[in-house]
Image (cartoon, helix red, strand yellow):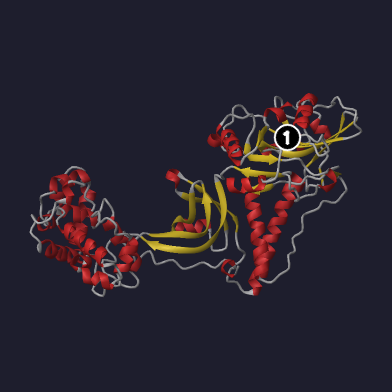
Amino acid sequence: MAADCPPWTPARALTEVAGLQQQLRQWDDAYYRQGLSPVSDSDYDRLSEKAALWQKCAGLPPSRAIPRWPADGRQRHPVAHTGVRKLKDKLAVSRWMQNKQPLIVQPKIDGVAVTLVYRHGKLSAVTSRGDGLQGEPWLGRALAITAVPPVIPADAAIIVLQGEIFLPRRQHRRAREGGGGDRARVAGLMRSQSSLPAGQRLGIFIWAWPDGPPSLQTRITQLSEWGFPLTRAWTREVVTAEEVALWRDRWFRGELPFTTDGIVIHSLPAASQQWRPGHNLWSAAWKYPAPEISTGVREIRFTVGRTGKVSVVATLQPVPLDDKRISRVSLGTVAAWRRRDILPGDEVIIGLAGQGVPAIRRVVWRVAERHYPAPPSEARFHEFSCFRLTTACREQFLSRLSGLSERQGLNLRGISRGSWQQMLSVPEFDHLLSWMSFTPAQLVQAGFSPVRSAAMVRQFLQARQLPAIRWLQALGVPVPRQAARHLRSEELTALSARSLADWQSLPGIGAERARGISARLQDARFRVLLTFLQQQMAKIPQTTVRQRGDSE
């Protein structure tokens, strides 16, 4: 556990725990009193776990109790709402299903949970879930919902049903359209003092009859006869976890008349006297993959790109999202990071942007004490900085080397940023092109195997034979591809001697780009590299090695 504990003083731990507990209480109030969901269930659960961890780390006793409403103005449930256990994958589903038969599976509808009470067949009470023991009285509002039968053909003194009031949808596909936030909309409609808007329909799905018959199928059939047909229409018998997974996937991709966020598996419940909030051994949920997920920020790091641009990266507590495991995310420029105000200890929501790139959508919780790390001076790094290796230049120097390895650079296969970082231990690594003269023995001393060292040196030798214009492009000279095609046979000395007019005469090069090319070629620091490159390219005859640049 110590590895997960933040490195805080006791005083700061008290401050942070108190602040997070206050936020959780505010969310409790919004959820239980107002029927609102400021954060998702999973995000709330994660922050509750974080509060408990921080308390344990600081040696504090648990202090958050489940919120309870005062009885005044509230209505008790005849049978408590228990909630359901959440299962993370098919293996967990399979384990949970062991020794439980019969079993049924239903969509987990995104709406508002309620209790319906019928006395001698007449609807006499409707109560919002609230805290599971008591909630808001909604009978008047429920009687305006045509899907809720005001009378059922039953003579029992009392029948208690639990279910979900939801917004009907037309051919809703969860995989394509997402959730939609229907729970908050339904809660708002049910709590409103005005009449339902014209044309506004609400539906009801019954998922529990605590004191119903001992057969699940008998319960479902009876509910349908009473006027709750959706329960039978959207209930399937299952025996294996594979069948559960099949229905989960089918309902995730198929067209449904409501929004859902997963599936729920039910076995025969315990007697209603045993129902209490947070205790349910007979039902479990397997939710759909979250389009977003919350996680904690561990560290803020600054990187310097090959052109000297300073970027900010947040290191995260690793979390699964879609089919990826996310442990870091870019925050963009220093200015963008400062605007977003994200620091270690903060809880953030991440999602996948275009091309599946993880991105921080919003901040759920910020730690109280804000200590901002100092970024590198942006004035110190630019397109002409860090051609030589120094302590201050290490980050940009590595970024420049990594760019040389890329396909659009010199295409040095298998030589990653990590390889370059290891290679920096060679004492002779002084400037950006020092590696061109390295021997296998030097690389072995840096920790590479003899076979790998020999293969890397062969690539270095082959790189010398690439066209000079390819080298200039790899080193950051902004020559466009269409212009480079006209220069494949020119030697380095001829390219370096080109005038502004010469460059501007080539396709794709205007006056501004020509000035940028000339500025790079005339820079004294860059010309030192070109001199070294010229010496290395002259060491091996052009005919001894295959011309990779012409075929790639």
Quadrant, the N terminus: bottom right
Residue type highlighted by circle 1: Ile
Left-right relation of 185 to 500: right
Residue at 25% in and 56% down: 412
Q: Is residue 392 above or below residue 127?
A: below
Quarter-wise, where is residue 462 in the image?
Answer: bottom left
- Residue 18: x percent and y percent? 69, 64
Where residue 370 appears, x then y in whole percent?
57, 66
What is the quadrant of residue 188 in the picture?
A: top right
**Residue under the point 53% across and 54% down:** 319
Task: Please name the residue that numbered disc 1 is placed on.
Answer: 165
Depth check, front residue: 159 or 390: 159
Which quadrant holds residue 454?
bottom left
Question: Is the residue marked by circle 1 packed among few (<14), some (14-19), or many (20+) residues within 10 Å?
Answer: many
Front position in the image: 380 or 134:
134
Circle count: 1
Q: Is residue 430 something that shows in the picture?
A: no
Q: Residue 91: image x %, image y %?
A: 59, 48
Nearer to me, 7 or 439 = 439
Above or below: residue 76 compared with residue 24 = above
Secondary structure state at the residue bearing disc 1: strand
The structure residue drawn at horizontal position 17% and vertical position 52%, both measured from the top left corner, is: 469
Vertical relation: 288 (above or below) 318 = above
Task: Kindly identify the residue that appears in the image at 26 percent across and 66 percent down.
Answer: 387
Task: Give the x, y percent position of residue 486.
Answer: 13, 45
